[in-house]
Amino acid sequence: MPAPTEALRTTLAQPRCSLGVFVPAGLHPPTAERRVLERLASSGTDVFEIGLAHHTPFLDGPVIQSAYRRALHNGNVLDRTLRAVEHAARHAPTVVMTYWEAVTQHGPEGLAHSFADTGAAGVMVVDLPDEAADTWREIAATAGLTAPRFAPRTSTERQLGAISATASGWLYAPASAAPTGYRGHLDLEALSAAVRRLRSASPLPVVSGVGISTPLLAAAVAPLVDAVVIGTPVVRALDRGPDAASALVAAYARALQHRPR
């Protein structure tokens, strides 16, 4: 097992719930972006999710959509994402988050090997088509990457079986069915039931994000899953500067510190 994927496995197997932090690549100049990643890592990030910008991120809300537009406007998206992943991976296991159209645009085989060369532990394609799932998992495995999969709560047993069979690294159970950035009520009972279904279908770790908008909610979700991921709150805080983002991540890390899974 390559070192990055082994580091990811070890992180998700620790007794407490891990903290994943999503950062869209290309929002800042390279030197500033490296400093941001270092600050977030030192504030309690266990796993980085680095976003490869896409022009139609339909599962994302307005904050991340806006961030992706800015990254695309800044240009050199793939190169800047590779550099961000390379730097993030020096500090914590790192998984790339993107959409299938972006993968096909850059070429699945070449993209997988490029991210593996930077030290990524995996690439999660949030809208991976079922008909491409087997091929993508093989491509990722050949490159030495995991291929985590998004598992909607509405999945039938047959769909869940197919998702589990073509996933590696982790299964992603959204805490809300809304787009990213949702700040309303979370149905923890429904999330718990969804996680139980995933654990029955697969031995893979279960990660949850989408709508975990406060440290208090993170603490409530933590006993159900192996990692909690925050994205929109971090992107929103980054608009106020690295100090604000660092303080936010530290608050989430404290909330998870004593929350066994």
Image: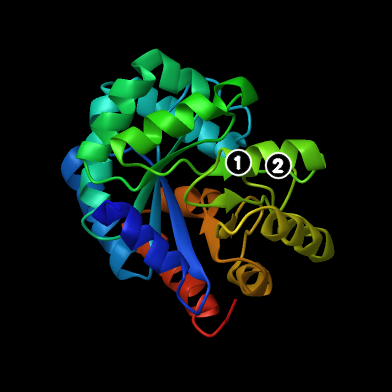
Residue visible at 64% across and 73% down in the picture: 216
Reply above or below: 99 against 233. above
- In the rendered image, which residue does mark 1 sit on? 165
In-image side of 213 versus 97 (left or right): right
Residue at 48% from the left image edge and 68% from the top image edge: 18
Identify the amino acid type marked 2: Gly
**Residue 139 lies in quadrant:** top left
- Total marks shown come to 2
Looking at this view, name the residue that lies furthest to the top: 105
Does the image show residue 261?
Answer: yes
Q: Position of residue 26 (x, y in %)?
A: 31, 34
Q: Position of residue 166 (x, y in %)?
A: 56, 37
- In the rendering, at what x and y percent does residue 215 appear? 58, 70
Residue at mark 2: 161
> Residue 71: which quarter of the image?
top left
Secondary structure at badge 1 equals helix
**Residue shown at 63%/54% (left/top)?**
202
Cα distance in 3D space between marks 1 and 2: 6 Å
